[in-house]
């Protein structure tokens, strides 16, 4: 049996190791399209901040780790898949056949259609190579503009601020992390960041990137609305999307990601998907969604490998789960944090102390939550949401006082 895995990130590496543990005799090929050791993108901000060196981003240490497991590493890019013939084409011109295939190609950074965005000195922060360029340019005292204040952008913001640059964040939405936080929480995060010396401009779009006519800076960024921004470095963090280009003509069904069933198998038998590229069952709804976070990548990589090697396990669904440290302010959102049709909510706000909690209910179940400025009981919130336990009379009590979440957890779980 020849197993081929496209993608050497957390999903692909976990899958390769799981396959080897379950099938000691099978042939395993792990394909990664970057000239790097297998690494975690989520470690890049720690590299930018100076907390770790490049080795700290590596998923596995030791030059012979994969060799010792009998896993062949191929550093190349897959450009096409022939599902019927069971082979794939590589950018180098070669090909590779397979019996079982895992698509774990992850995501790629998205560039908005802005004039001048292809100039030197403009970088995404998605690869180790990106990080090297940014560290070279983001020196103390330099003016840096970060375009995008979503989840990834806000993580990068923390690292850039710690490098001592003069940082401005530009976000097209009306608040920071709009896909993770409601208007109240996103507004408080922006206010907090301003108090820490970061300039934050929301409801603002960069419309063009020009050379600075005065020559004092590298760029002059046209903004709508507002005055232009000078910059020595522009970091683009306007989102990512699953990498699907190599699947054209493959016969594999895709939507925003690769569509899979409960076993993480695609529309083509014997071909599976995991990680950021996988569009699987969404916890708490009948939808299929992409959940691009590392814990989901690891779990789906493991489960897909079990099924590829003859097992029979089902993926129970992934839940929106975000934890962000925004310059020391801890922010979390879980599950259906935006609420559900016909549902109820409860919130508690202390704006002066940057503390906020909002709970979302469906009937008498907790289905989502947002917290700001508090780390206690976060695990309890997540447990109540994932377990879908009925709260009974504790729903009304939580609506009156969301701080009683621990009491609600103990009372509801001990009733079984």
Image (cartoon, rainbow, N blue to C red):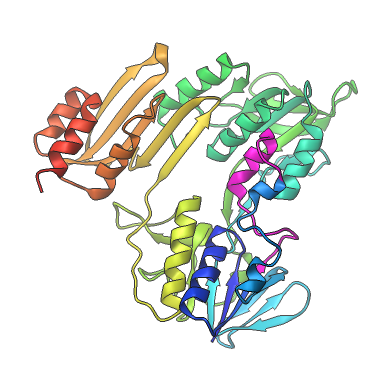
216 above or below 253?
Answer: above
Q: Quadrant of residue 218?
A: top right
Count how many numbered circles sit on residues in the image: 0
Residue 31 or 291: which is nearer the viewer?
31
Give the vertical position of 380 relative to 285 (above or below): above
Q: Magenta stretch: give its range.
A: 31-53
Visible residue check, residue 366: yes
* Quadrant of res 392: top left
Q: Position of residue 31 (x, y in %)?
A: 65, 70
Quick one: which residue is furthest to the top in this view? 352
On whether residue 36 falls in the magenta region, the answer is: yes
Q: Position of residue 338 (x, y in %)?
A: 34, 37
Q: Looking at the picture, tell me which residue is in the foreground, 262 or 37.
A: 37
Left or right: where does residue 239 sit relative to residue 311?
Answer: right
Q: Residue at x 77, y 31 (%)?
A: 138
* Extreme residue toward the right, this view: 215
At horizontal 78% and vertical 74% (from top left) the residue drawn is: 92
> In screen coordinates, is 85 left or right of 91?
left
Question: Residue drawn 49% across and 81% down?
Answer: 23
x%, y% of residue 157? 62, 31
**Which residue is at a point 67% across and 33% down the rendered structure image?**
49
Horizontal and vertical percent position of residue 172: 57, 31
Question: Which of 403 and 338 lies nearest the eye of the viewer?
Answer: 403
- Locate the N terminus by quadrant: bottom right
Residue 6 in the figure: left or right of residue 270: right
Magenta-span inclusion, residue 71: no
Residue 253 seen: no
């Amino acid at each position: 049996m020849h197993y081929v895995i496209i993608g050497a990130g957390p999903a692909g590496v976990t899958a390769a190791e799981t396959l080897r543990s379950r099938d000691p005799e099978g042939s395993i090929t792990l394909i990664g399209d970057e000239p790097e050791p297998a690494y975690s993108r989520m470690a890049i901000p720690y590299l930018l901040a100076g907390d770790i060196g490049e080795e700290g981003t590596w998923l596995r240490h030791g030059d012979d780790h994969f060799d010792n497991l009998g896993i062949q590493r191929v550093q190349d890019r897959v450009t096409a898949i022939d599902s019927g013939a069971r082979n794939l084409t590589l950018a180098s011109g070669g090909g590779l056949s397979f019996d079982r295939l895992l698509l774990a190609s992850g995501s790629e950074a998205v560039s908005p259609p802005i004039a001048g965005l292809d100039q030197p000195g403009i970088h995404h922060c998605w690869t180790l190579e990106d990080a090297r360029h940014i560290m070279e340019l983001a020196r103390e005292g330099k003016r840096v503009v970060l375009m995008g204040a979503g989840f990834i952008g806000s993580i990068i913001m923390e690292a850039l601020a710690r490098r001592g640059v003069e940082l401005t964040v530009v976000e097209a939405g009306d608040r920071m992390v709009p896909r993770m936080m409601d208007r109240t929480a996103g507004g408080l995060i922006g206010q907090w960041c301003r108090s820490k010396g970061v300039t934050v401009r929301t409801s603002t779009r960069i419309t063009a990137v020009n050379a600075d006519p005065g020559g004092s800076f590298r760029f002059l960024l046209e903004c709508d609305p507002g005055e232009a921004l000078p910059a020595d470095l522009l970091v683009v963090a306007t989102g990512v999307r699953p990498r699907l280009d190599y699947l054209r003509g493959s016969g594999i069904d895709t939507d925003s990601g690769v569509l899979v069933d409960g076993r993480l198998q695609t529309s083509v038998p014997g071909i599976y998907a995991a990680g950021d590229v996988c569009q699987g069952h969404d916890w708490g709804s009948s939808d299929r969604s992409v959940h691009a976070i590392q814990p989901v990548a690891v779990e789906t990589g493991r489960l897909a490998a079990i099924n590829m090697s003859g097992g029979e396990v089902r993926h129970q669904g992934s839940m929106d789960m975000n934890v962000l440290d925004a310059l020391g302010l801890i922010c979390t959102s879980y599950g259906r944090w935006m609420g559900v049709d016909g549902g109820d909510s409860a919130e508690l706000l202390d704006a002066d102390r940057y503390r906020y909690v909002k709970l979302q209910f469906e009937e008498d179940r907790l289905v989502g939550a947002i917290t700001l400025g508090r780390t206690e009981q976060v695990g309890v919130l997540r447990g109540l949401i994932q377990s879908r336990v009925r709260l009974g009379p504790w729903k009304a009590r939580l609506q009156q006082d969301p701080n009683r979440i621990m009491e609600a957890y103990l009372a509801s779980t001990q009733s079984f």
